[in-house]
Amino acid sequence: MAAPDSTQWILQLVWLFVLAIPIACVAWTVTHEEIFREPREYCVRRSQDEGSSLIARKFFYLFTCEYCFSHYVTMFFLFLTRYKLLLDDWRGYLISLFALVAVANVYMSAFGRLRQEVKSEKLEAKRKEKVLEKVQKREQEEQEQEGPAPEPARAPVTLSSRSR
């Protein structure tokens, strides 16, 4: 399927929001996920190396910043899809570049916030679990100090009470 032209503006908007998804996924994965931790740490060290040239530092910084990296990922996807927004010439590429970066970064921000909330909830659950364990342990120690609990008294069962 070819990218929509400027007469199909609704389809262009659909492409905008759909094409931003893989851009956000690639940019987030490279700049945040564990699978790229070692290369990312290398890039962080190289971007902070005062002995390197400005261009080299900026090049390596690109792989540590999701916003910066999303521009290059977007350029790759624009080359791959030939997607243009609103206009059918070079200006359409320029508009689509910045629109895709903006939408992809909204997606990444939402995902980052969601991950933070999930992490926060997990930590809160662990904290509550530890408090519960301490309370249960304290109750168990108190019961052991008091001795075995007496059995509750049972009411005698009579024949007349059973028949009802």
Image (tube, grey):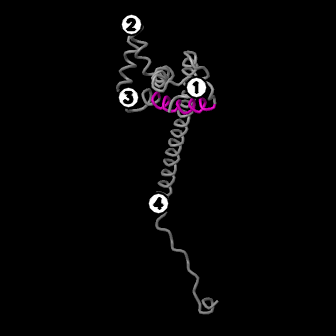
Q: Is residue 1 left or right of residue 163?
A: left
| Magenta region includes residue 125 | no
Comparing labels 1 and 4, the label whose residue is closer to the camera: 1
Give the alpha-carbon distance from disc 1 to disc 4, as whole Å: 81 Å
Q: Nearer the viewer, residue 105 or 81?
A: 81
Q: Is residue 140 above or below residue 25?
A: below
Badge 1: few (under 14), some or many (20 or more) residues near its Cα, within 10 Å?
some
Check whether the beta carbons of the residues at disc 3 and disc 2 lie within 8 A of each other. Answer: no
Q: Which residues are magenta?
A: 10-27
Query: Which one is earlier in the sequence, the residue at label 4 or at label 2?
Result: 2
| Magenta region includes residue 11 | yes
Check whether the beta carbons of the residues at disc 1 and disc 4 lie within 8 A of each other. Answer: no
- Helix, strand, or loop for circle 3? helix
Badge 4: few (under 14), some or many (20 or more) residues near its Cα, within 10 Å?
few
Name the residue tied to disc 2.
53
- Helix, strand, or loop for circle 1? loop
- Helix, strand, or loop for circle 4? helix
Q: Is residue 126 above or below residue 6?
A: below
Q: Is residue 42 left or right of residue 150?
A: left
Query: Which one is earlier in the sequence, the residue at label 1 or at label 4?
Result: 1
Query: Which one is earlier in the sequence, the residue at label 1 or at label 3?
Result: 1
Q: Is residue 93 above or below residue 2?
A: above
Residue at 56 percent across and 80 percent down: it is 154
Name the residue tied to disc 4.
145
Given the image, on which type of amino acid does mark 2 rest?
Ser
Name the residue tied to disc 1.
5
Give the alpha-carbon distance from disc 4 to disc 3, as whole Å: 52 Å
Given the image, on which type of amino acid does mark 3 rest?
Arg
Give the alpha-carbon distance from disc 1 to disc 2, as whole Å: 42 Å
Name the residue tied to disc 3.
37
Q: Nearer the viewer, residue 118 or 64?
A: 64
